[in-house]
Each structure stands twice: as structure tokens, then as C-alpha cells.
Amino acid sequence: MSKTLIFIIGIFLVITLLILLSSWQFKRMAETLSKSGNALEFKGLNTEEIEKMLRDLQGLSPNEATTKEFISPDRKLKMNYRSDWFEIKEKTMFERIIPKERLERYGLETIFLAQKIGKKMFAQLEVSKMGLEKERGFTDVIEMMKEDNRQNGWEMKILLSTTTEEEMVFQAEYKKAGKDDVHSIEKMLLYEIEEKKKVYLVSFITFEINWRNFEKEATEIINSAQLI
């Protein structure tokens, strides 16, 4: 298969999977992949072939993954992740997937998006940034997330959480009748600049049936996310 063809298929695959989004829009992930029974069959390609294509696009062999560091454009946040994630850098795609009301009210912005495909497994890693009114905090963000999901027929339940003045780490499950359950581990980091509150939301999202396979890596990524 030529590099050009691999690139075209890879881009098409990325566009197809781009609807598999963070906790604001994660429900599309379950709705899309459940149609293919989680097998991620795509145009006659099985998951091993898709995984190989993504490695080829990144120039990686199966055992060459190393640690990479993401630093936010404003240099306020850093995070470590493995190089075998397929990073999506097309900014116009981000603009299409952010809910308009969130964008207008809170300036919600996706600044990092990556996906990982394995044998019958899929995970997504996203970093978003938003503004908050002075009197609001982590609880308000959680309630907004719950309401956003409720309006789309999903139930969001916090499984466990730890909170400090500047950070909140939580795991959540998302359920909808007839759809695959989704599991996430997420971290919110709060800071103030020019008397305004800003929140980073780092989200690792996968299907519930895949969670145990990703738990160690997900926890390491979330723990590595910190303000600079």
C-alpha cells in the first residue's frame, strides 16, 4: 500500500472517528462505534490493519513508542503521553465539534485531541480549556456536564473523585439505553489570570468493557497533567 493511499485512508479514518469526543460530547462515541459492534471494522479493514496504518502515518514500529510531552499554547499546562497516540491537529475540525452555546458562553476550546486504536479497543484523549465566572467552581462544571448529557439522553454518574483547591480528579460512567457504556477518568485544573477563572479539562475516555485494559495508562496520563 502506497504512503499516499495510507495517508488518504488515515485522514478519512480520523474524520470518521472525530465524532468520538470528550465528556461534553462523548455520547457520539458510543453511538457511532456501537453500530459496528465495537469491532471497529472499517472498509474491509480489521483493527490490526487500522492500527498498523496509524503507526505507519506516525512512522512508528509496534515497540517504538516513547513518552511525549504536551504543553498548552499558553504554557500553563503540561501532560505526558505515549507517542503511539494518533494526534489530530486540524484546528478547523475542533471548531466544528465544540457545542456553540459552550463556545459562546465559556469560550470552550479544544487544544489537544488524540486517539488510540487497539484490537477491539478504542480510547480518546482530549484537553479542553474554558472560562468560568468568578463565583463558579468544579461542582458547577460537573453539573453542566451532567445537564448537557441528560439533554441528549445520557446519564452521567461520578464514580469517585478527589478535590483540592486547584484540582479535581474524577472517574465517571455514562449510560444510555441501547448504547455501550462509556468510562472516563478526567482532571480539572483551575487557575486565575487577570481576575478571571480558567479551567483545563483533561479527559481520557473509552468504553467500559475496555477500561481495565487502559486503566494503568489512563491513570498515568491524568496524574502527569499539571499546571506549570
Image (cartoon, rainbow, N blue to C red):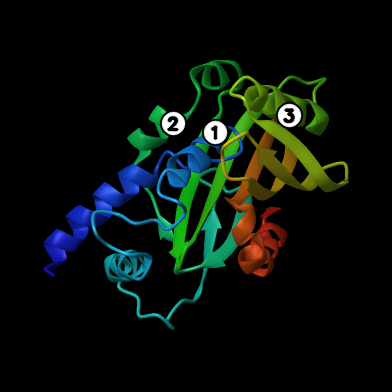
The Cα–Cα distance between marks 1 and 3, rounded to whole angstroms, is 14 Å
Measured as percent of width and height from the top left, residue 87 is found at 41, 55
> Badges 2 and 1: C-beta atoms under 8 Å apart?
yes
Measured as percent of width and height from the top left, residue 184 is found at 66, 49
The local crowd at label 1, few if under 14, some if 14 to 19, many if 20 or more residues have their Cα within 10 Å, is some
Mark 2 vs mark 1, foreground winner is: 1
> Residue pushed farthest bottom?
63
Residue type pointed to by label 3: Val
Mark 1 vs mark 3, foreground winner is: 1
Q: In this figure, which residue is indicated by the disc labeled 1?
A: 25
Q: In this figure, which residue is indicated by the disc labeled 2?
A: 97
Looking at the picture, does residue 171 appear above or below residue 215? Answer: above
Q: Which SS class for mark 2?
A: helix
The local crowd at label 3, few if under 14, some if 14 to 19, many if 20 or more residues have their Cα within 10 Å, is some
Question: In this image, 144 relative to 48: left or right?
Answer: right
User: Which label's residue is closer to the chain start, 1 or 3?
Assistant: 1
